[in-house]
Image (cartoon, rainbow, N blue to C red):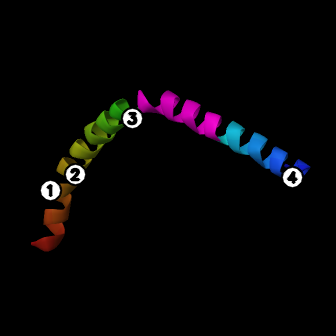
Amino acid sequence: MDALDEVTEINRTHFATSVREGRGAVSGLLPAAGGALLATAAPTVLGLRPRLAEFRG
């Protein structure tokens, strides 16, 4: 194995480890982020609906 292959393998291992750690850190936040998105989107849609009805009629 030449030097380039060794460096490539070191970087690939580091990348795979970083991805695994990142997914582990984010996986706990995803349900909370989804809930926050729905909690924000629902009132927004309900508040815009009457305003959009004014333009239709």
Picture disc at residue 50: 1
The relative height of residue 14 versus residue 54 in the rendered view (above or below) is above
Residue marked by disc 3: 30
Tag 3 secondary structure: helix
Q: Nearer the viewer, mark 2 or mark 1?
A: 2
Q: First in sequence, mark 4 or 1: give its number.
A: 4
Q: First in sequence, mark 4 or 2: give its number.
A: 4
Q: Position of residue 57 (x, y in %)?
A: 9, 72
> Which one is in front, 47 or 24?
24
Residue marked by disc 4: 4
Q: Amino acid at mark 4?
A: Leu
Kindly report the distance in space between the C-alpha atoms of the residues bearing marks 2 and 3: 22 Å
Dot 4, how many residues are within 10 Å of its Cα: few (below 14), some (14-19), or many (20+)?
few
Q: Amino acid at mark 1?
A: Pro
Main secondary structure found in the magenta portion: helix
Q: First in sequence, mark 2 or 1: give its number.
A: 2
Q: Nearer the viewer, mark 3 or mark 1?
A: 3
Residue marked by disc 2: 45
Tag 1 secondary structure: helix
Q: Is residue 24 magenta?
A: yes
Q: First in sequence, mark 3 or 1: give its number.
A: 3
Q: Which residues are magenta?
A: 16-28
Lateral position of residue 33 relative to residue 13, left or right: left
